[in-house]
Image: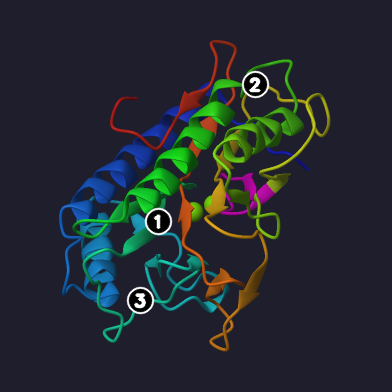
Amino acid sequence: MIQLKSPRELDIMAAGGRILAATHQHVKAAVAPGVSTLQLDGLVESFIRSHAGATPSFKGLYDFPGSACISINEEIVHGIPSAKRVLAEGDIVTVDIGVHYGGFHTDSAWTYAVGEIAPETQRLMDVTEASLWAAIRVATLGNHIGDLGAAVEEVVTRGRFSVVRDLVGHGVGAAMHEEPQVPNHGKPKRGPKLQAGMTLAIEPMVNAGGAATRTLSDKWTIVTLDGSMSAHFEHTVAITAEGPRVLTTLQV
Ligand code: MG
Ligand code: MG
């Protein structure tokens, strides 16, 4: 069942989302060659917990050991923070963070460049972020979940990259993963109709090469099958009568 949130509940989620956005700014400033993903995870956890009532959603979720999922280069999602994983010049690193605050989760991922990156890698990041904003623009009353996926797919296809189909966005609220699923591909006017009070984690994952994925032996990390780079941008967005409201930003 899709859980609709009241305006008061959306304001609580926006407060948690502000903490999450500030956490991203904090961790982004620390991304540099020589830094381990465990160090970044420690920064995420301590920064979130420095806000009264806020906790990292992912810590212990399905027994995940970290506070953030941190994925480098060909890793798409669910990278486990590790002292052995050290960022190098030219890498890209995706930091996926959830914050639990006031009884609700918010969810936001961002891919960051480590020092100088190749122009084609920068283009992968730009196209992926653009596909997120294209989906957010059509997250309006009267549209359907399929409109979001179609918008992502259109931008990514035009950019000559591949949308990951094995992983999807999701409703988010009292539980981190709620209905409906939010695929990054689809047809306009298909799927559940968007309603006021729906809160969606919209999260295109885009590969520079093919769409195929595989899971590493750690049973968490999902990588591109062909070893190509992958980028991931995610916001938690509320559907409202006034239009899409991005909750995981400092500007709400
Ligand atoms: Mg996420
Ligand atoms: Mg998510």
Query: Mark 1, residues whose alpha carbon is within 10 Å: few (<14), some, or many (≥20)?
Result: many
Give left or right: position of 46 versus 194. left
Residue 123's mark?
none
Residue 247 percent coordinates (x, y): 43, 33
Amino acid type of the residue that numbered disc 3 sits on in the rendered structure: Pro
Tell me if the residue at label 3 has its CB under 8 Å from ligand 1. no
> Which label's residue is closer to the chain start, 1 or 2?
1
Amino acid type of the residue that numbered disc 1 sits on in the rendered structure: Ile
Predominant SS along the magenta part: loop
Check disc 3 and report the residue beneath it.
81
Depth check: give the residue in front, 80 or 2. Answer: 80
Residue 204 percent coordinates (x, y): 56, 46
Query: Mark 3, residues whose alpha carbon is within 10 Å: few (<14), some, or many (≥20)?
Result: many
Q: The C terminus is located in which quarter?
A: top left
Q: Are marks 1 and 2 in contact (CB under 8 Å)?
A: no
Residue at mark 3 to residue at mark 1: CA–CA distance: 12 Å
In this view, the mark in front (1 or 2): 1
Residue 142 percent coordinates (x, y): 74, 15
Check disc 2 and report the residue beneath it.
196
Q: Which residues are magenta?
A: 169-178
Residue at the spot 33% in from the left edge and 46% down from the top edge:
20
Residue 3 higher or lower than 29, as above or below: above
Residue at the spot 59% in from the left edge and 24% down from the top edge:
239
